[in-house]
Image: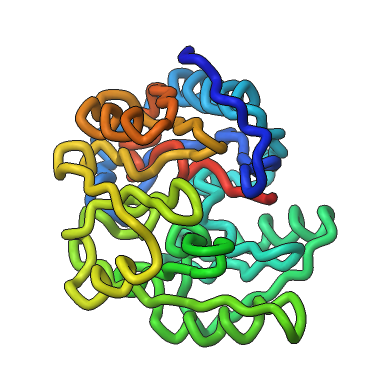
Amino acid sequence: MNKIVNSSMMGVAKRIMMCRPTHFKVDYSINPWMDEKVQADFEKATKQWNTLKETIEKCGAEVVVMESEDARDYPDIVFCANAGILRGKKIYLSHFAFPERYGEHVFYKRFFDKLGYETSFNHKIIHEGAGDALWCGEGMNILVSGVGPRSDVQACEDIQLKMKLNEKDQFYVVAARLVDPRFYHVDTCFCPLDENLAMAYMPAFDSVSQNNIRNYTELLSVPEKDARRFVCNSVVIGKNVIVHHGSDTTFKLLEKHGYQVHPIDMSEFMKAGGSAKCCTLRLE
């Protein structure tokens, strides 16, 4: 475990949701990383999940766990970044692109209802939550929203309409078209580090989207070899970055910019196309 950098600053994640991997397995193939012949080791995956949880807590954030005993038919529910998009005490619940994950929103709604959130759900528009939409820019008021494999461009307008906290609340949704099937969600290739800086594998986006993103945040470009190890799928808590091990080039770049890297093993979850960020959802 690396040294923890003090995370008592404005804008730092304080509460993070995780969903226990009770039924996690590779039961189908809905992204280029999944292969039913390459099954995850459940015991190892559980240990990796626990290590992620413990590392988040050591970095200063509280973890709120959603239990999933009754979600037996949804092995991917562990990837709770896809639960929805949060702003204040509102959540725009996901409507999944594949039938294998359709029913997850029922469990997420129940969880967020108990926490006192106002929930929205649009069964006519495909969008996969904070896996495909990340806040960045000044005041964290820019929402980079994926368009392509898993989310429809129509969601951008719907999110803008339904997620305002009040009449004075202003934020902007920036559509970002994904063009590389390996990076099927925004959080596999883009990771805001703070209001002014993000790391990204920009070839995953089309040229227009690349230019649009650069209008709102400075970027640390990651090499393809690190992008394929899902280095952008990191959990950021202040100056602490929790990430799957092995992306040394990017780790050095992060350290140069004052970040403390906490490498952990997420290999079993990567068999299903996810890593550290996919297993979390920032609540506040």
Residue 37 seen anywhere in this rendered image of the structure: yes
Task: Name the residue at 48% across, 12% down.
Answer: 1
Colour option used: rainbow
- Residue 86 picture quarter: bottom right
Q: Is residue 273 above or below residue 139?
A: above
Q: Residue 70's spot in the image, x, y percent?
A: 68, 45
Q: Please state if 166 lies on the left or on the right of 274 as rendered.
A: right
Task: Name the residue at 38% across, 77% down.
Answer: 175
Q: Nearer the viewer, residue 73 or 229?
A: 229
Q: Residue 11's spot in the image, x, y percent?
A: 63, 49
- Residue 244 picture quarter: top left
Q: Nearer the viewer, residue 114 or 67?
A: 114
Q: Residue 261's spot in the image, x, y percent?
A: 40, 26
Task: Name the residue at 48% across, 81% down.
Answer: 156
Q: Is residue 94 above or below residue 27?
A: below
Q: Is residue 58 above or below residue 36?
A: above
Q: Please state if 85 lies on the left or on the right of 25 as rendered.
A: right
Q: Residue 117's spot in the image, x, y percent?
A: 79, 63
Residue 73 seen anywhere in this rendered image of the structure: no
- Residue 162 picture quarter: bottom right
Task: Name the residue at 63% across, 43% down.
Answer: 13
Q: Nearer the viewer, residue 81 or 176?
A: 176
Q: Is residue 243 above or below residue 4?
A: below
Q: Nearer the viewer, residue 55 or 19?
A: 55
